[in-house]
Every structure is written in structure tokens, then in C-alpha cells.
Amino acid sequence: MRHWRREFSRRHIDIGGRYASMSEFLQFFFSGLTVGAVYALVALGFTLIYNASDVVNFAQGEFVMLGGMVTVFASAAGVPLPLAALIAICVAVAVGLLLYWLAIAPARGASAVSIIIITIGASIFLKGGAQVAFDKQFHKLPSFSGDAPIDVLGASILPQSFWVLGGTLAAVLILYVFLEKTLVGKAVLATSANRLAARLVGINTATIMALAFGGSAAIGAIAGILVTPITLTSYDVGTMMALKGFAAAMLGGMGNPLGAVVGGLLLGLLETLGAGYVSSTYKDGFAFVMILVILFAMPQGLLGRRTVDRV
Amino acid sequence: MTTLLNNRYAILAALAVVIAVLPFTFPSNYYLRVASLVWVSAFAAIGLNVLMGKAGQVSLGHAAFFGIGAYSAAIGPAHLGLPSWASLAIGACISGLLAYFVGRPILRLKGHYLAIATLGFGVLIALVITTESRWTGGPDGMPVAKLTVFGWRIGTAYAWYWLSAAFLLVGAWIALNLDDTPTGRAFLALHDSEVAARVVGIDVAALKLRAFVIAAVYASIAGSLLAMMNGFVNPDLAGFQHSVELVTMVVLGGLGSIVGSIVGAAVLVVLPQALTVFQEYENLMLGFIIIVSMVFMRDGIVPMISKLIARAR
Amino acid sequence: MKIHNLNQLNRRAVGCLLGISVFGLAVCGPAYAAETIKIGSVLSITGPASFLGDPEDRTLKLYVDKINAAGGVAGKKIELVVYDDGGDANKARTFATRLIEDDKVVAMVGGSTTGTTMAMIPAFEEAKVPFISLAGAIEVVDPVRKYVFKTPHTDKMACEKIFENLKQRSFTKVAMISGTDGFGASMRAQCLKVAGDYGIQIVAEETYGPRDTDMTAQLTKIKGTAGVQAVVNPGFGQGPAIVTRNYAQLGMSGTPLYQSHGVASKSFIELAGPAADGVRLPAAALLVGDKLPDSDPQKKVVVEYKQAYEASAKQPVSTFGGHAYDGLFILVDAIKGANSADSGKVRDEIEKTKGFVGTGGIVTMSPTDHLGLDLSAFRMLEIKGGDWTLIQPGS
Amino acid sequence: MLEIDGLHSAYGRIEVLKGVNLQVQAGEVVALIGSNGAGKTTLMRALSGVQPITAGSIKFLGERIERLPAHARVKRGVVQSPEGRHVFAPLSVEDNLSLGGYVRRDKEIEADRQRVYAMFPILHEKRHLLAGGLSGGQQQMLAIGRALMGKPKLLLLDEPSLGLSPLLVDQILAAIAALRGDGVTVLLVEQNAAAALEISDRGYVIETGRIAFSDKASALLSDPKVKNAYLGFE
């Protein structure tokens, strides 16, 4: 106890140390936010598909991979970066639609776990395809606005981090406006809330689900494009992304777009703060222990749908 | 044939015949190795099927128990001087106890929340195994002492074939007989409807927990067997990919079907071996086959086949 | 395994699939008679270690074709059987059995990672089939196992080479950030073990996961540790590239950064970008072949390999492919020396390898040394202007 | 307007509709009565295209529609208010009504919404609340209102009064009766057969998947067979 008090007072006297720990914290914080923003986008993709179709899509990470890899290869072929990114989004959307039409729609009525296995199969398939179509190397993209770090109160932040954060914010806003302010967006929510009633008011639920897969693929691809200049990419980055994105979506509460974002950012922060203040070796463990604790306390996630029982 | 698939003694007899005949068709010991792998994986899958097929609970971290069993078989003889078979038993006890204590809070969660919680648990165990290298040899793994039973060292491919097959038969027998016990009947009620089961006075939480413990013990024993058979363990055995593989075996073969678990394990072990001829297209093919089989056999291979046979009648 | 065998390959594939569908497993018998010498290989061509397995695979195929085009070894053609374990040790173990029992190979050159190698060792030891591993860790050949050899420098040697250089620069306080994959963890352990021998004190230690995408948190902690004179990063794959980039981002470039031989390929420089400038690492002569003096005995070998590989693979050479080259030719020389394809005799010949000039160094094996390289095989390189440069001894 | 001919439908191997024949003329209110499990709801769902049929034809305004997907039928004017309310619980009342007009592209959607509010003032009062929070009767009103937003030519009402208090039943039935004044044709399935026949022109009695008999509503009301089986003693 006395030792602790001495430690405490020492910290307060050591102003320089306090400054250092403040800038350290900011460094952790911004790194966590950047990493978390990507998890948030992946989680958002999970949420969109889950909302429309009740499917948990474990191939979600593959959209991130496609976004990065297609952009890399298109720009290597001489296509200007913005156009290459657009091509990548289109490719991902096409893959998302095909995934729905060829693998998910034909399995209509299968159990949830069967459909999860289908998406895992799709993930293996897409990874295998990327390995043949591209290669097995790691690749990078140039940062969108240079590599000179920006100093924020002693923390060095890459300009690309702001792109990631801004991109995430934009994606979330667009999705929010789409879901809350457009009739088609509400039709997505309606489809998720009550498939039968949705069909009875004339919503083409198959189209809505295809839309969700396409949109989710686009979000994933955007995440891949934004983050590749920081994290590099390769044909098999998807598995880890899917794992973290799924964790983030569950942490926030499956089915809630805002929850996905909160869950993603929180997971990113848990990881970096865990690495910074607890132990870098056990940082993933720290993150998952926190997830378990939160879920035990709130079994529906932080912002989960308070189950309105479906009839 | 359908009645055959439903009669448990017929299933066991058929399985025994297959096990006895197969080695005569094998051109080399390599096939014994692959078959032994199938038996061991099937053993784990049967256990997981009790949890998934009968209690209706999914676990995406089940390889953790597999890993605990495997590392028990490795650490027991290497660090504690225990005999291998005792290490196997201790591993099974540790897994069962861990499942009992972890299962209580985890199984309160539902659906995908349960999935992520088990996944997190699996990641934690795998992380501990990878990190505590003084005991586990770290990410590169560690060697495992050969199994010795009554001074007889089990090392040959044949010995392992028969041993793993014997374990599988016993494991399948226990799982099949579960239906006749009060627990098994309670599972049936639970399978129909959780609410209904609760109404007739079944302690649903305790029942799920029992299934979780059973599944953990099965996985642990399978892990120990594989470790001793390979003479080597590494953290992959406890990893997420392996968990997914186990779940895929169960679902592909057919939820709730013991034969299905064996078939699922066989497919997932043999397929990558067969697909090596496609070289770099291997993963493409594997993913494609998984998708196609789940789309066209959504209930799994074995239930689908028995349905087809029933319809042909 | 190339085009001229495609027909047999297809027939075998069909037979195999048929066998699997009808009988479960049987019917996939061996497809070739013994007029060829069979060499096996299990590599991590896909998965997290694909940057090791892929160039190894390309190298083996390229040179087996070359050898066969030139008439083969001891009058017989070489037949190469390659399996991809995807980095999974359990899969590797099964393929090892397959090579031994089903393909009946004379010897094996493969095992991209220490994890897969260690899993396969029991199978080869038991079957008494020589196994030349391409994995990094010292535990592959220490303790010496009768049938196991390896070609890459050990992680212990890499630590020693780095510490030797640190000592020459009079740095004693060092921070370490290592990957938690097999390579990183094993090298970390070796570095901790030998640090004392060079008077090095490890004052800060951090780790990162093999799939981590951001190491600024760990590096920030190192940055905040007083008195760090240099940072060492044992790791392979993309991790070290991200560490290097984060290092520059945090403005730590004033403190020297040492990478390991695990990043010894051009793609590291490309991925790390300008941040790689000033990074030092121990690596084989292969990376700086054109900069070697003509008197260097390795020059001819490494320049030829580099040209052949880059022409065929259309990608920059890495030391990993070089390890496969060394393994293949040590084996071929041994088969020539034994004038036999008998596994036991070939093993004895491998152990007698003396003065073999490879891409990794000059190899002289013995019953107590199944690696046969010493510290001189490592060159200390520094990255300057996007290329490797040899540093002057003592600087 | 609607002609159903020999309609068959099955759940797995169990055949629920065994050749139903039924007609509805434009401007009529037709009641379909029958005991539980007779196939009423199955028929309604088959008409809307959310229950697959195995044989038979459905003609609407002279056009075969039995192969059309559900949303195309809504577009043609066949709109259903399903049994059990089925509102979009996590969406607001207003959003529920907007989605009722999902297939429409015309300008009168807002006017129609006001008309629904006029019909059920309580919905207007609670228009910003989530539909899941409404009482059972209010949800039923919302379901009917939502169906009306689809501008139905033929409105299929499945058990609109199920589980409601007598007061609410009267209110709902009065609303249905008012619809015919607006020129909407109605096919009505009701447990409360007497009340349904009161507001109907004609009625069909369905028994174990087949139409047993049909007649004018007034005739059915006085038919002793119907009285015994479906209306109870009065």
C-alpha cells in the first residue's frame, strides 16, 4: 500500500513522465482506432448480410482480401489508383452477388450451421482462387497522401489512418442513411424483421438479400483498399479479418450496425491497449477475455437487438 | 438399409467389418496412416456431434480440448514422468473439468453468441499453448513419447490402425447407447423443443453442460491419440482452423448422425490427400466440394443418403 | 512431375479418386517403376509460410528439370514428388508417411518451417530415409539425428552474427521485438541464450502475432524505454516489414534496427519501402551475389542461381529458394557419390559432404554437424537506397 | 376477378389443399370459413405466392398468376394481411405503412397513408413508435392498414379478428365493411364465422382441403349445417 502511494506521488511529480505517458496513450489510442475501424467495417459487412438473410458470412474477410489484392494488381497493370479501387469494389460486389446466387440462395431453408459451413467453403474457395489468380506474395499499396507521419500531442499518426477513419465514418453514415432514410433500406430491415410479411407487402426478398451481399462485399472491399497501405495484403488475409470482424460484430451485438462499429473500435482499442499496458504476448487473449466478460454480463452484446420475439 | 442405419448394433457391426476388411485393400502403410487419422478425427467428431446434433449447441473452439488432450500426452511423459496412458486419462479429466466450469457461463449464451464465446475460449487455450513454451515447446511444438502398454511399445502403422479403430468402436458404441439412457432421452426432448423440454421438467442447462463435457472428453482423448500416433504435437491442433474442421466434419456428415460423423471425418481427411493431384487448385477444389455438398445435401451426407434410400422404397 | 508425365499423372488421379469413392481409400498404387530416382518434398507452398515454400517449390522443379535435361543422375532421371502442407504440421506428418510408404522416395528435401520439419522427423528417422530440411531453427540438427540434415543457417547463428556486429559498434543495451510464430519464437530464445556471450543486455522485450497488422503499441513501449541502443526483430513474413514501417512512423530511425535472415528477400525491401533504409540483417551471399568480389568462391554459384531462378520464376530471388537449391544438390552429389539410390548409402554420403559450395555458404558436414556452415556463411548487409549492400567488416 | 381452379398444395408429404375451386367477383366481400386445419391459411398463402402449390391454377383479372413470385402478385393488386399480424416489429408504425406501399411508384401514397390514419386514428397517434410495442389489436389494425397501402384490387384478410376483444372485433369488421364502399374486393378468412358472414356477400365453407359448399352469405347464416358446425348455438 505504501509502495503504491509512493508510486502514485512519484508519477504526479514527474511531469515529463506524465507527458510521455499521455503521448504514449494517444499513440495506443490512435493505433487501436485505426485497427478497430477496419474491424468495424468487416463487422458492418457481417451485420448487413445477417440483417437481411440471417446468414453469418464467414467469407466476409475474403471481400477485404479482394479489395486489397485487386487494387494492387490493377494498379500494377498501370490502372490509376482510384480507378483500380473502383474495379476492386466492382469485382468484390460481383463475387458477393455470385456467392449469394450460386451458394446461399440454392440452400434456402437449410439450417443456420449448414449455411455457415457453406460460407466457410466459400472462404476456402475464394482463397484458393486468389492464390491461383494472383500469387502467394504479400503486397502493398502506396499511401493515399504520403507517408509523413502527423504529430498529434506527441503521437505519430500516418495520414492513411485518417483515410481509414474517414472512410469508415463515411461508410457508416452512408449505410445509416440508406437503412433509415430510404424505402429500399427499410425493406432490408423489414426483410430481416419478418421475411413472410416482407414478401406479402411485395418486397422481392431475394433481391434484397442479393443487395445485402453486394453491399456487404463493397464495404469489405473498401476496408481492404483503405487499409492495405498500412497493413499490406495477401491472398490469405481474409481469415483473420473474418475472425476479428465476427468478434467485433458479436461484441457490439449482432444485427445492429451501430453495435458493429462500436464493437470494432472497441476490439481494436482492446488489442492495442492490451499490447501497450498489459502484455503484447497476451494481447489477443486480453481482447477475447474482455469479449467473454462482456458477453457474460450482456448476453446480447453491447447494443444487441433486444429480442423482439419473432413469430 | 435405412433400418440398418437406425439399428445401432447393425451400425457397429458394419463399422467393425469395414475396419477389419479395409487393411487388406491397402497397398501401403500410408493408407493405414490415413485410415487411422480418419478414426481419430471421427472419434472427436462423434463427441462434438453429441453437443451439436443432440444438444443443439455449436462450439467453434472445440479444438482447444483436442489440444489439451494432445499436450497432456506430450507433457505428461516429458515433464512429469507419467506413463502415456495415464496422461491420456488425466488430459480427459482436465478437459472434462474445464468444460464443466467454462461451460456453465458459456452455455447460457445463445446461437451466434455461444459461437463467439466458444471461439474466444479456443483462441485463449491455443494462445496459452503457443506462449508457455517452457512446457509446450512453443509454436514449433514438442515431441511425444511413444505409447507403451504393458511393456509393448505401440509404434507400427498397423498397431495404430487397430488401436485407433478400437477407440472409435468404443466411442461410437457409447454415443449410440446414449439414446437409451435418461440423458439420451432428455436430449431427444431437448432436440424437439427447448421450451417443451423445460416444461416436462428437464434441467436444460445441466443437460447442455453434460453434452459439453462429453464432447470435451471425446475431443481430448482423440487429441491424446493423435499426439501419440504422430510422436509430435504443435499448437495448430488447438487452433481455430482445426475447430472449424471438426465442426465441418459433423455438419457435412450429418448433424445427429454417428455414422455421419465418421463419414464427415473420412471426407475431410481423405479429400485433401486425393486433391494433391490438382496441385495449386487444391483449395479451390476443396472449397467447391464443401459448397456443393452442403447445397445439395443440406442435412449432411448420411441423412441425405438414408432419405434417398427411403424414397426409393 | 512435369508435362512428360502428365498422362500417368492423370490416370493416377482418376484411379485415386475412383478408389476413394468406391472403396474408401484403396487402388492408389505407385505409378512408376524404379527406373527413376524418386526424391520427395513436403513444402508449405500455401499458408502463412508460403513465401518460404513457394520459392522452394519453384527452385526444386526448375533444377530437377535441368538435371533431367542434362541426362539425370548416375544415368537415371530424377522424379520429384512435391506435396503442399499449407503450413500445417499434422498434414506434413501425413505427407511424410505418404512419401515414405506410398511413393517410396530415396530421400526428402523439404520441410519449409521448423514446425512442419519437427513433425516429420519421427517418420523419417523411423523409416531410415534421409531428410534434408529447409527450416531455420537449430533444434532441427541439435541434437544430431542420424537421418536429418538441414541447409539454412540456424537462428542461433543469426543472433550471433547480429550481436557480433553490435559488439563491434559497442552497443550493449538492446531491445527485442519478436514474432510469436515458430521462427520468431525460436530465434528469440536463441538470442536470449547467446546474448551474454557478446556482453549484450536485453533491456526491453515485446512480441507480435504472426497476423498482426500494427506494431506501434509495442514499438512505442520500446521507444519509451531508457537507454535502448539498438532494436533486434526476430521474425519472418510480413511482420518485420510492418515493424520496419511502424519504426519509421514513430521516428525511431535514429536507433539502428536489425532484422533477421527471415526477411532475406527483395520483397521485404519493397514492402517496407523507404522505411527499410538503414536496416541491417545477416544473410547469405546470394542476396549480394553481384557485389561479391570475383575471388569469392560462392560468386559463380549464386549469380548462376539468381539468373536461372529469376528467368524462370519472374520474381526476385530469395535465400529461401536458395536453401532448396543447396539441399537438392547436396543430395544429388551424395547420390552420385554413393552411385546408388539406396537411402542408407545416400545418407552416409550426405554426412560426408565436404566443401560443397552452395548459395548459403560452403558446407562441410560431419557425424556431429548435420548443417556444416559456420558464421562466415553469413554476411552482414545493410539496406541502402532500396538495395542490399555489404557493410565493411567492423562498421 | 379471381378464379381458383383445382388448387393443390402440400407440406412435405401431407396434402393440405386437395383441389380447391373458388371464385370472387369484383366488388364482392367473400368469406371463407372452416375449422382449424381445414386449409384456410394455406389457401391464402398460396394465393399470395408464399406457399408453393403442386397443381391447379389461379386466375386474377383473366391472367394466370400461379407461377408469379409473391412480389409480382402484390404489384398486380393481390395484397394480404396475414394471420398473426406479422408487423415489422423493429420499425415504426409509419415505416410499416410506407413499406405497405413498397411496390407503388405513384404520388398518392401520402394521401393513402392519411386515409389509413383516418380509418385507425390510434395508428396516427402512435405513428412514431415501434410496431413491436403496439397492443395486439393495434398491430392488427396496422397489418390491415399496411395491406391497404399496397392499393389492393383484391384484399386477402386472414383472421383479422383473431385474439381481439369484442369491441375491437366490431371496430375492425366495421372498417372492412367500409372498404367495399371504396371498391375494394375482399376475401376474408374468419374464425368468427357469424360476424364474417354478416358483412359478406357470399361465403365458402372449406373442409379438409376441399370446398364443401358455398352460397349467399345470408343463406349460409341460416343454413342449419353451418349453424351447427361453425356458428355455434345462438
Image (cartoon, coloured by chain):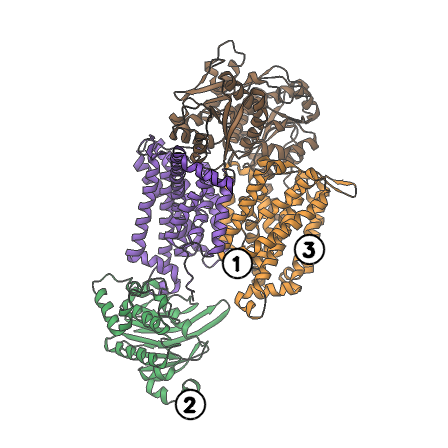
Chain colours: A purple, B orange, C brown, D green
Instruction: Report the mark closest to the observer, 2 or 3.
Output: 2
Furthest toward the front, the residue is A2
Q: Residue D79, position in %: x, y?
A: 32, 69
Using the image, name the chain to which the residue with label 1 belongs.
Answer: B
Residues at marks 2 and 3, common chain? Answer: no
Q: Is residue D136 left or right of residue B192?
A: left
Marked residue nearer the N-terminal end (3 or 1)? 3
Q: Secondary structure at mark 1?
A: loop
The answer to whether the residues at label 3 and label 1 have Cβ atoms under 8 Å apart is no
Pointer 3 chain: B
- Residue type (three-letter) at the residue carrying disc 3: Ala
Q: Label 1 vs label 2: CA separation?
A: 51 Å
Against C227, residue C47 (above or below) is below
Image coords of residue C44 (percent x, y): 54, 34
Residue D229: name its quadrant.
bottom left
Q: Quadrant of the C terminus of chain A?
A: bottom left
Where does label 2 land, which residue? D233
- Residue ID for mark 3: B14
The amino acid on which the numbered mark 1 sits, given as a three-letter code, is Arg
* In-front residue for pair D220/C125: C125
> What residue sits right under mark 1 in the picture?
B108
Q: Secondary structure at mark 2?
A: loop
SS for tag 3? helix
Q: Nearer the viewer, residue C188 or C22?
A: C188
Circle 2: residue type: Phe
**Disc 1 to disc 2: CB gap under 8 Å:** no
